[in-house]
Image (cartoon, rainbow, N blue to C red):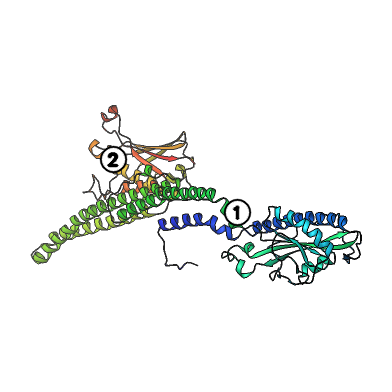
Amino acid sequence: MLLPWVRFRLRTVLIVLSLFVLVLPVAGIQVLRLYESALVRQTESALIAHTDFVAATFRHGFRDATTDLDTHSGPLTNPEHDATKRRRAVLDLAGADVFAPFPDGRRATAADDVATRVGRAVTPILQDVQTRADIRVTDYRGIVVATNATGLGTDLSIADEVASALAGFEHSRLRRVTGEDRPSFTAFVRGAAVRVIVTGPIVLDDRVVGTVVAAQTPSTIVDALQTKRYLLLQAAGLLFAVVVVTAIFATRTLARPIRRLVTSAERVAAGDAVEIDVERYRTKELAQLAASVAAMAASLQQRTQYVRDLARSISHEFKTPLAAMAATLEVLGDHLDDMTPEERRHFIDNLTGDVARLESLTQRLLELARADMRDQAKGESNVATAVGDAAHLDTGVDVRLRGDPNVVLPIDEASMRAVLKILVDNAGEHGAGMLTVHVAAHGDKTVICITDDGHGIAPGDAARMFEPFFTTRREQGGTGLGLAIAKALLANANGTIDFVPPTRSATEVPNPGARFRICFRRQ
């Protein structure tokens, strides 16, 4: 388990994974036990074939050499022996027992003379056979009479396999390799540390005239690799090239883009204006992440600029009444005793007005903050429910509904009511007596057109009307935050509000009025 405070670079992780892929085939050699067992079984099958051939050759020679079988053979004590039955390989390297090394035999008396004569005839055949197996043929007492190796004339009956074969039994067994013959790599390749021993009786007319002992070290994985070394070198080179190309590809498509993205995010966190090129990221996930970071950066930069402008505007808006209050208090402090009651009342009224303006600004700022910072509005409403009637909105403006005011809008009723209240209030403050709300569906959008018959908006003011603190009624107590609050409330519901400039003919009438358009995308 990795410690929670340990962190690795992505490049390090990619290199480790590449190296793991590189050494995986080499490590797989250690676990190829099934292949080793197959090699052992293949060796056993070959030795069985050798023993069967040698036994048949010796048996035919023995039949021709004597007719006195009882004198030159032993009894067959295995009642289940069947010379016509084909032996099968049964050894399994994973589960078979491995016995002590095969004994070298002991000095023996003279072998059976018939077996010796037949053995002399068989020996050249054994020596001519191109095989890695050590093959020995014994007489009915276990004394070697023919071999392609060493040990001629030794008594092998001390070996369990030979003693069992003299009784008519067949055996296949694994024995350890002796110390001087033990390869140095047996710790890695188990098959190199054993020899396969196959023994079988030579049966003639239900009498045992001798045995065949065949022994061979099986082929190993190392031998197989040695014969295919050039092919393996080519495969290793190809694998190494694939790993290198994969590492380079992963670095270019993952490590470097992520590093570049981290650098951009750090610059954004430091407050720098950063433009993130999403097209430079070639993977979909990183492109999506880069797009999200770019959107976040743009939002943060926009929010930062918004906060700066808002702080500057707040400072300006609060500075004027505060300066006026400070001046009024200074005058009252210096000349309070010299003032008439009317003068004192005038200055106190000025203070009251400035306090009321500060209170109004504070309340509106709180509303703007709640509108800007609230989560996306959830709920539904319609214009008919939100508007109610002019009396319920507490204005002197006659509100008339047109189109389909019962269309469901993706905004909660409180927010929609607040937006309409702001627009109705603005219309009344600009001399409107009637306001028309027209609701209609256009394609995948729901459009609400709000038109009043007031004095309208000057062309020079239209571009700034949604800016916080912009107002043409500052002397009348206007804060310039109403339309900014309405825009924020609609934005939280994925809605928009725009001012629709009047046509040229409309500007020629005394009261051209103002027209706003609210849009919601239909679900």
Could you say where residue 463 lies in the image, as x and y percent from the top left?
26, 39
Q: Nearer the viewer, residue 344 or 399?
A: 399
Residue assigned mark 2: 431
Could you say where residue 495 lies in the image, as x and y percent from the top left?
40, 43
Binning the other alpha carbons within 10 Å of mark 1 as few (below 14), some (14 to 19) or many (20 upward) gives few
Label 1's element? helix
Instruction: In the rendered structure, find residue 224 and report the number of the disc placed on it.
Output: 1
Q: Nearer the viewer, residue 387 or 53?
A: 53
Q: Give the amino acid at mark 2.
A: Gly
Binning the other alpha carbons within 10 Å of mark 2 as few (below 14), some (14 to 19) or many (20 upward) gives some
Left or right of 245 in this view: 212: right
Label 2's element? loop
Could you say where residue 58 lies in the image, as x and y percent from the top left?
81, 57
For marks 1 and 2, the one nearer the N-term is 1
Left or right of 222 in this view: 400: left
Residue at x 54%, y 55% (from the top left corner): 25
- From the image, state whether disc 1 or disc 2 is nearer to you: 1
Q: Give the amino acid at mark 1.
A: Ala
Residue located farthest toward the top when viewing the structure as drawn: 505
| Above or below for 498 versus 373 | above
